[in-house]
């Protein structure tokens, strides 16, 4: 699968776009972590390398935005870039967290990890106060569908089971 090095955030009217500026191969961490959106830190046992820039993004093992805060994942052709996009709709908790974290961390990177692979690592240029994220780039529709399936599987596993009372 093709991976992307994302270095810019662009706010659109309907969603936040993570805009790809170069293609790259990325490596995954040897230590497995859940899919989600992370805040890059200086050092950690969880490092992901963008081989096109040789930059290593370290993250803590708990995402800022986890699959629990993602309500819906969709894949579509992106009309502005003629590429494929992965759209993430966040719940109220996820949108609130995203706004709080990005307000305090402008200038830092927010790696997007799916299936223990670095999909992107955009740099925050402003606080993000939206509930929809759009990841765009040169990955194929098949890659995007695969990422969607992985996220949806993790979302189903993360949902708490509702047990019925006996006798219902």
Image (tube, grey):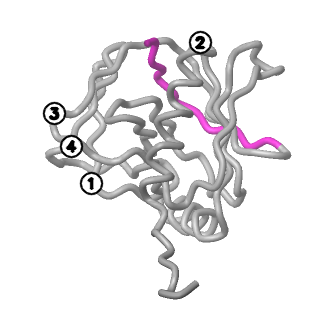
Please report the residue visible at 65 percent of the width from the left and 63 percent of the height from the top: 91
- Mark 4 and mark 1 in contact? Answer it, CB < 8 Å: yes
- Return the x and y of residue 87 as percentages of the image width and height: 67, 38
For disc 2, the marked residue is 140
Going by the image, does 12 lie left or right of 22?
right
Going from N to C along the chain, the mark reached first, 2 or 3, is 3
Identify the magenta region.
Answer: 1-12
4 and 3 marks in contact (CB < 8 Å) = no
* Percent of width and height locating residue 93: 59, 70
Name the residue at 40% across, 44% down: 35
Is residue 102 part of the magenta span, yes or no? Answer: no
Residue denoted by label 3: 30
Other residues around mark 1 within 10 Å, as few (<14) / some (14–19) / many (≥20): some
- Figure check: 49 above or below 36: above
On screen, residue 22 above or below 59 = above
What's the CA distance linking mark 1 and mark 3?
14 Å
Extreme-front residue of the structure: 167
The residue identified by callout 1 is 60
Report if residue 2 lies within the magenta region: yes
Whole-percent x, y for residue 99 in the image: 61, 64
Give left or right: position of 159 versus 40: right
Nearer-N-terminus badge (4/3)? 3
Q: Is residue 165 above or below residue 63?
A: below
Q: Which numbered marker is on residue 46?
A: 4
């Amino acid at each position: 699968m093709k991976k992307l090095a994302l270095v810019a955030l662009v706010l659109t009217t309907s969603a936040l776009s993570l805009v790809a500026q170069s293609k790259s191969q990325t490596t995954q961490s040897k230590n497995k972590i859940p899919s989600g959106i992370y805040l890059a830190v200086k050092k950690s046992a969880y490092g992901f390398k963008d081989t096109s820039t040789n930059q290593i993004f370290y993250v803590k093992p708990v995402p800022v935005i986890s699959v629990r805060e993602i309500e819906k994942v969709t894949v579509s052709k992106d009309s502005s870039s003629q590429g494929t996009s992965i759209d993430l709709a966040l719940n109220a908790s996820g949108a609130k967290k995203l706004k709080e974290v990005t307000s305090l961390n402008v200038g830092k990177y927010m790696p997007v990890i799916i299936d223990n692979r670095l999909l992107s690592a955009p740099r925050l240029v402003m606080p993000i106060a939206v509930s929809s994220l759009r990841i765009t780039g040169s990955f194929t529709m098949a890659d995007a569908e695969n990422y969607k399936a992985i996220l949806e599987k993790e979302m189903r596993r993360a949902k708490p089971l509702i047990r019925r009372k006996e006798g219902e």
